[in-house]
Amino acid sequence: MSRPTTSYANAEDLAQRLPNARLEPIEDSYAFVPEDQPEQLTELIREFAG
């Protein structure tokens, strides 16, 4: 099974192009953040949703 991924450089480019975007690096995460660091991802989504 393949997982979609993107390079950090591509993510930085998208964050610069999208209004109100922010890029949040998540340490100890690899190809799929929801599996690698679900708690950190959940917290970032909660902050975003306000």
Image (tube, helix red, strand yellow):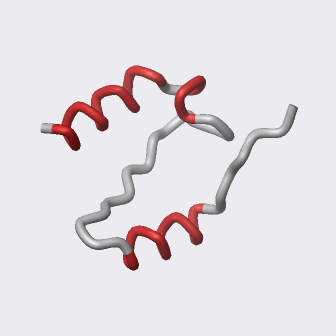
**What percent of the width, then of the height, locates residue 30?**
64, 39
**Residue lying farthest left?**
50
At horizontal 31% and vertical 60% (from top left) the residue drawn is 22
**What percent of the width, then of the height, locates residue 2?**
84, 39
**What percent of the width, then of the height, locates residue 24?**
37, 51
Q: Is residue 32 above or below residue 7?
A: above
Quadrant hosting residue 18: bottom left
**Residue lying farthest right?**
1
Task: Say which quadrant the C terminus sits in.
Answer: top left
Quadrant hosting residue 36: top right
Q: From the viewer's perspective, is 46 left or right of 23? A: left
Q: Is residue 36 above or below residue 22?
A: above
Q: Is residue 2 above or below residue 25?
A: above
Q: From the viewer's perspective, is 30 left or right of 21? A: right
Q: From the viewer's perspective, is 32 left or right of 43? A: right
Q: Is residue 40 above or below residue 16?
A: above
**What percent of the width, then of the height, locates residue 49?**
20, 39
At horizontal 23% and vertical 31% (from top left) the residue drawn is 46
At horizontal 57% and vertical 62% (from top left) the residue drawn is 8
- Between 27 and 31, the one nearer to me in the picture: 31
Question: What is the tally of numbered marks visible in this picture?
Answer: 0
Task: Say which quadrant the N terminus sits in.
Answer: top right
At horizontal 30% and vertical 37% (from top left) the residue drawn is 44
